[in-house]
Image: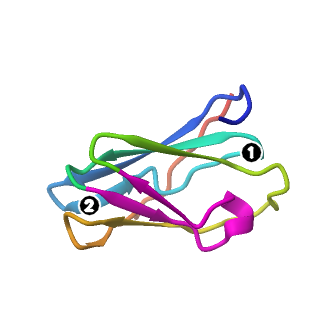
Amino acid sequence: MGSDREATEVFVLRTASGYRVRPAYVAASPGQDVHFVNLTGGRVQIFFPDRSAFGTERKDVAPGRTASITIPERAETGHFPYAAYSEEARDFCLGESSPEVIIRR
């Protein structure tokens, strides 16, 4: 695990309108953990195109389980996309279309 800073959680879930990632945008600092919680009922694969920002290319998350990454200390500042693929839906999960406020302590 990363530092003693509070971890950020991302939920991958099945809703009436499809498979979603909430929140779609998360803020994290180098050394901080990001937990991906799979609430879909099927296996989810999280893909990280920029390995330097995430320290890995992919995480597999079993149904009802959590997979974590620690943002590397060497990670650059910026916006880095990732993707969540639901094996149950056989499709990629969508993020939110509305902006969100992230309050960090």
Residue 65 drawn at (x, y percent) = 35, 40
Question: In the visual, does 33 lie left or right of 63?
Answer: right
Q: Mark 2, residues whose alpha carbon is within 10 Å: few (<14), some, or many (≥20)? A: many
Quadrant housing residue 52: bottom right
Q: Which residue is found at the position 77% from the left and 46% from the top?
A: 30
Three-letter residue code for mark 1? Ser
State how the image is colored: rainbow
Magenta segment includes 72:
no
Residue 50 drawn at (x, y percent) = 67, 71
Q: Which mark is residue 29?
A: 1
Q: CA distance from mark 1 to mark 2?
A: 27 Å
Region in magenta: 43-61
Residue 71 drawn at (x, y percent) = 70, 49
Question: In the visual, does 13 lie left or right of 5?
Answer: left
Q: Which residue is found at the position 59% from the left and 67% from the top?
A: 57
Contact, mark 1 vs mark 2 (Cβ under 8 Å):
no
Q: Which residue is found at the position 74% from the left and 45% from the top?
A: 29
Looking at the image, residue 85 lies above or below residue 11: below
Q: Which mark is residue 19?
A: 2
Question: In the visual, does 3 lie left or right of 67?
Answer: right
Give the SS element for disc 2.
strand
Looking at the image, residue 99 lies above or below residue 51: above
Q: Quadrant of the C terminus?
A: top right
Three-letter residue code for mark 2? Tyr
Q: Which residue is found at the position 23% from the left and 73% from the top?
A: 90
